[in-house]
Structure formats: structure tokens, C-alpha cells
Amino acid sequence: MSIQNNRLSKEVLVEKFSDVHPPFEHAEGAAIEADRCINCYDAPCTKSCPTSIDVPLFIKQISSGNIKGSAKTIFTSNIMGGGCSKVCPVEKLCEGACVYNLLEEEPISIAKLQRYSTEKAIQGKWKLFERKPSNGKKVAVVGAGPAGLACAHALSLQGVDVTIFEKEEKGGGLMTYGVAAYKVTPEFCKDEVDYILSIGGIDVQYKKELGKDITLADLQKKYDAVFLGIGVGIARSLDIPGEDLDGVVDAISFIYDLRTNDYSKIAVGDNVAVIGMGMTAIDAATQSKRLGAKEVTMIYRRTENEKPCTDVELDLAKLDGCSFIWLASPKEITGENGKVKKLVCNKMKLGEPDASGRRAPVDTGETFTIDVDMVIKAAGQIPFEELVSKSSVQNKSGKISINNNGETNLKGVFAGGDSVNGGKEVVDAVQAGKDGAKGILGFLGVK
Amino acid sequence: MANLQSNFLGIKSPNPFWLASAPPTDKKINVIRAFEAGWGGVVWKTLGSQVKNVSSRYSALNYNGRKAVGFNNIELISDRPLEINLQEIREVLKLFPDRAMIISLMADNDRKSWHEMVKKAQDTGAHGLELNFGCPHGMVERGMGAAVGQDPEIAKMVVEWVMEVATIPVITKLTPNVHSAVPGGLAAIEGGTNALSLINTIQSVTGIDLDTLVPNPNVGGQSVFGGYCGPAVKPIALKMLTTLAQEERMRNIPISGIGGITTWKDAVEFMLLGASNVQVCTAAMISGFKIITDLCDGMSNWMDEKGYKSIDDFVGLSVPKITKWEELDINFHIVANIDQDKCIHCGLCYISCEDTSHQSIAVEKGNPYNTYTIKEEECVGCNLCKIVCPVNDCITMVEQRKGDEYLNWIEYQKRGLPLNDH
């Protein structure tokens, strides 16, 4: 048992990390699917999209051969509509609401159609938006993730000059660094960010981290307004003995490594335990398996009914051959020579509903032990509490508080995305960025 | 099992489905394949004067992803040597003696030419003749085809020429490119025709290539009006057929129905409106001769279900049900009803009624599904919501009569009852 890289050949790795949801190969395929759409009034799909994309309209536009119009319809509501078509859990959003579900028929492949139009636009560098002439207003955006990019694009469109400060080398945030590689490729993420920035009026300063290279006070002084789209930080710790052993990693770092290095260089254990059952946990589990781990066991403290990931995501893990232990909570990690050896778990049972409305897991007092050589922590992420508190931004355990206009307690400082909501989907962050931009434009008096 | 045997003017065929005079019936090889597939008869593609065809020849109307809901051609009559056609007809007649063989004819516009043509056709042993008075392009410019059909006097004259020498039944095929098919039909009857068939194709432009700006079909950068057919023309054909079927002076004249017949249901509809048999072309051109299997099977099963033993049992049964507007019962009133258990909340009924009709559907917003209900007092019973609803039997129209008695427009006026009261 050991953690090692190069478990599989390059060819196998390429295949394992190829697109999990392949696109339409032919225009005819997209047209046939588009023609299935009955173009609902006050469409449930649109109402179920956090960015309210006019789905029937963009599908009708594919059907009529107006692909340019279709792409514009999508991007007008969601400038990351390309990436979202690949990473959105559509089964619980637009496609989950499609009226065909009520006929027990396959819902319209909305994501696949959205991908069809947006990929053409991004690859073809279609110029769909024209920014208004600069009005002299300057706004600083912290974080080039989905919230920051959406905010910057919406501001630039109205003639505001935007500077984005990003601590990483690339834009895109968790889209670029935190999503399984078979959902979006690093190349796509780069193209998408470039496409968003191609509107002009947005200067991105990479490798500039808030609290280190820049301070909020400085930004407040130099800019007419600030938008904080700083996201959330590292994985929540398990707070159990043995967490510092060699072989315990957090899912975000693990996926980050995968996104920034050659797959063959990423080390993975023989027997991997993944703690958690959210989207990130699924991504970590499936990718471990695809890197060549022999056994991947996902451990979750509640049952399948309460899981945060969708059925489609769970099926991905099942099809990859991951196994699942429900109603189990890590108690201790034991090691040998400083390396992970075993994971001891408490057996749980379901008690009364908790604040989330789901039945809470309760310790039964019984334990069991499994042999592992790697533990990936994916039990949620925690906000940048220290950073936020230092800047005297009002927050709740690190989650930034904002009012209805997206503004924080500091005048002219707005926020949105994971740093406010604690961690949701990309599409939620995009909407938060739009909302922030709206608040800022109102604050600046830009019409 | 219902009996699909057809007897049209004494011409017998195992089923009432003939292939219409068109490309599928231009050659022995096609016709043999059709008979092997099970077609009851063919009307051989029009024989006549010498022609030369162009390329391309067809174009189509596509709608919402469905290809060729309408079809268009600029092809002329048979461009093969007359003698070869006649020889092949003789050969097919020998191979398939139980199938109907009709020859479509279009001679030059003089008595001698028609006489010669009729005699040559009869000599093959064919069972009947069909006079092409309908071809809307190419031949018209030379005084033939629709040029004959559009002028009742000329039509009558030509039919008279034909009947002078005809020894087998003669069907006159009418053009739809007139405001009414009745005068042409009556003229053909006066001329002595034994039967009528309709419709031929309707003049059309199916569309334009938005890159070249040349309408379809493109012949070297130009186009021309073509003859329109396929599913899109069925309603027009049914209407024209009905006007003939309702005409007292045509009572005893059999009609062969043509125009967009694609399924057995279409065929039954033509026969219910007075066609004794039907002719098919476009559906076979789009899908091949095999469609005859379901045409026969579907009609037979429907007949069994309804208790019709032979096709004559239902021919014309719907003709009396089409009346004049002024005879409709004004007291008949229906209102829509939405079955909430079946509703999928697509809102199509609501938006069509709200935007374009009578604002008779109420919406209660929900997330993500709205609830839609009928405002019965506002509903005029127009059927629009039922037409747009994607779920079968979700919206039904429920009878709520305005009065017990039958009350038509004439009587309504006489009584001075209120108008414009909605």
C-alpha cells in the first residue's frame, strides 16, 4: 500500500479524463433536440435557473438556426453560461423542472444545447457585447472567480473601468481550480475567461492577494467602489486525531493539483477514503479512481436520502466503481511511521431534523475500522474568517453579510458569491456577481 | 378482416391505394417494385408530347425539424420514348394482372393527337385512362395541362375528343389552381368523362436560399413556380373534393382522391368525403413503397373496429356533415376544461388564449409550476387551448348549450336576437 503517481499510462489517463458529458457531434442532433422543446410560457426551466436564462428562447433560436442570438440570450443572463453548461447540477435546476419530467419523458437536454451555442461563441470569439464608452468610474473587484468575473463584465458593459485582483495565476476561480477535470478542461476555462474579458475595460492583476499584496483600505481609497468575490478557503477540518498524518489531504488542494499539473504526476493511494458526499467529494472520489486508485470509499454521516450531491453525481461515482459507507463519521486516523494506515469511524443513526431540515446523524457508540492509505477531506469548505474580520467587514463566522443591494457594512464595498453564501454552485456565484454590479451601478449613479 | 377490394368504374384492385401519375410510376422497374410491395394500382406517369426536363427538379418545405411537410416539383411529363413506356406497360400488365393499370395522358391540343394517343394507350390492354388537365408548369405554356383544366370549355372539348375513341374508362384529373374545381369538373362530365380525380399540384414557391437569394429549386441560379403537394396540401384537397362530392350534378361520378395522403387516416378521410379510392405519391417518394403495408393494415383495422365490411360502406359518410355556416347551431356552446392531474404546467394554453384569443384562462403563479384554470364565463369554446396543449385529453371541450333548441343564423336574425354581445 502506498501513495504513488504514474499508476496509469498517458493514453488511459487521457481517456479517463475526457469529457463526461460529450457535446452534440452534429448540428442535426442539436436541432432535433431543440425541436423537442415545446417553448413553455413562464417556463419552469427559466424559473429554476439562478441566473434566469431565457431557456425557451435560446432553444428556439437554435431551432431557427440563429445560433448567435442563442449564445447572446444565454450570456446576457449568465456570462459563464459556457462553463455552467458543463458543471451545473442541471438535474436539480433547469432540467429537473422541465415539464417533460411530468410526462415521465426525458427532459430537454438544456445543458447540452446551452453548451452547443456557447462553445461556438467562445471558440469563434463572437463579439456579442459592446461596452459603453468609459464613464470614468473605477471599480476594484477582488477575485476573478465566477462572481468577480460576472460583476466585472456587467460593470464594464456600462462603461465602468474595472480592475480585478486575483491571487492565482489564472482567472475562473473554482471553475478553473476546483471542478473535476472531466467536466471542464483547463483549456476551456482559459478560453472562457479570455472570452469574458474580451469585452475590454477590465484589467486583471494576477498574483495579487488580498491581505498580502493589497489591502481593502487601499482599494477603498483608490477606487469608487469595491466588490469582494473572494470565495471560500480550505476544506473544513475533521477535528479528529491523526489528521496531520502523511496521506491526509483536503479535496480542494487535491483537485487544484490535478487542475494545475499533468495527471501522471498526481499521486493517489491504493485505498482512498473520501469524507463527505457533496459535489466536491464526488469529484475527488471519481478522480482518485480515474487516476488509478484500487479502492475508493466514500464516507458520509447521513444516508443517501440526505446526501448533498445529486443522483446524477452519485451515479458517476457508482459507475466509476467507488463504494459507499452511509451513516459513518470519522473518529480517528491511525498511522505507521507517520503515514496513514487505518480510518476508524463511528456508526451513526438518524435522529431529529436539524437546522438544514435533514435528520441529524447521531452517534450510536459503535465503531468500525477500514484500511486506508489516503484520506481526502471533502466535508465542506470554510470561509476566510480571519481575512474578512481583519478588514472590519461585518460577517457571520467569516461569511460576509450584505444588504439587499449587495453592499456590506462598509460604504462602497460590495460582496457576493461563495464568500457570502458559504459555498454554492457556480451559477449562484454568477448571479451574485450580477447583483453586486447592479448595486454598484446604483451606488455610482451609472445609468 | 375487412375487405379492402376496390372497384372503380369496374377497374378492380386488391386495395383502394393507387400510386398517382408521377415519378414513382415512370418506369417498369418502379412499378414492379410497387406491385411487389402491395400497391393496388398505378396511374402511369403522363405520356404525351416530347419534352426535356431540367435539373434540379424538387424542393420541400420543412417545419420545426420535420422534413418535407410540403413538397414541390418542376418536373414535366414522362421524358422517355413513348414506345418504351407502352412496351413496359404491356409487360407489367402481364406480370400483375390483378392490379389496376391506368395511363395518364396529355396530348398536343388537337383532336388528332388526342385520338392517336388514346388509341395507343388502349392498345396496351390498360384498364383505364386519366386525362392530365392539371400539370401546373412547363406544359401550361404550351397550352396543355392546367391550361386545359383552367378553361372549362377547352376541358369539355378535349374530353369529347377522347370519348370519341375511348373504349376503356376515362378519369379526368382536375387542377386545384382555380377558385373552384366545380366548373371544370362539370365541363368534363358534360364532355362525357366517366370519373374525376383531384387534386393535381398547387402552384408554389417553397422557399429561398438565404445565401444565394435564389428560390428553390435552383436551376442554374433561377427558379420557377412548381407544383406543391405532400401533407401540407391535404386540407385544401379535402375541401375541393367535398365541393365535388356535394354537387348534385356529379352524384353518380366516382372520384379518385389525391392530395397529401400519407397515412391510412388521411385515406379514410378522403373516402369519408366522397373519394371512391385514393392516389398517393409524395409519401412514397419520401419513404418508399413499403408504406403500403400500414396504409392497408391501418384502414383494415379501423374498418374492423367500426364494423365496415367493405370500403363502399363508408365512402361519403362525412359529406353531409359539412354544411353552410348559416345552418350551424348557434345554441351549441362548449367551454374548455383543464384536467389538473394531466396538466404539465407548460402554460401554452394560457399564453395563446391571453395573447391572441379571449383571455379566458387564469394563472396562479407557482415555483416553478404555475396553475392554469379556465374562466368559464369568458370562454367562447374556440378550441385554441386544446390545439396547443401537448398532452392528450388534458384539455377537453365540455358542452354547455346556450339553449335546448337548434337555432341557426337565419332564424336568429329573424327573431332579432342580440348581436356583437360578447
Image (cartoon, helix red, strand yellow):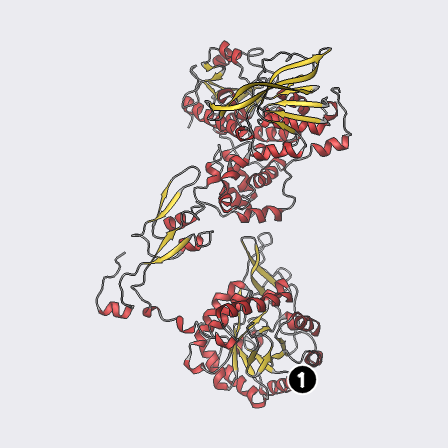
Name the foreground residue: B153 vs B196: B196
Give the total number of marks visible in the rendering.
Answer: 1
Q: Is residue A352 above or below residue B31?
A: above
| Relative image position of residue B18 (x, y in whole percent) | 59, 73
User: Which residue lies most toward the top here?
Assistant: A390
Q: Is residue B183 left or right of residue B280?
A: left
Q: Amino acid at mark 1?
A: Thr
| Relative image position of residue B21 (x, y in whole percent) | 60, 74
| Relative image position of residue A274 (x, y in whole percent) | 63, 23
Name the foreground residue: B354 vs B48: B354
Q: How dense is the environment of label 1, judged by Cα within 10 Å: few (below 14), some, or many (20 and up)?
A: some
- Is residue B139 visible in this depiction of the protein? yes
User: Which residue lies most toward the right here?
Assistant: A9
Quadrant that contains the C terminus of chain B: bottom left
Q: From the image, tell me which residue sits under label 1.
A: B124
User: Which residue lies most toward the left here?
Assistant: B416
User: Residue B277 is drawn in which quadrant?
Assistant: bottom right
Mark 1 falls within which chain? B
Element under label 1? loop
Residue located at (48% from left, 12% from top):
A221
| Relative image position of residue A215 (x, y in whole percent) | 53, 11
Name the foreground residue: B345 vs A411: B345
Q: Is residue A267 above or below residue B74?
A: above
Quadrant that contains the N terminus of chain B: bottom right
Q: Is residue B269 left or right of residue B322?
A: right
User: Residue B95 is drawn in which quadrant?
Assistant: bottom right
Name the foreground residue: A46 vs A63: A46
Residue located at (52% from left, 62% from top):
B232
- Is residue B177 visible in this depiction of the protein? no
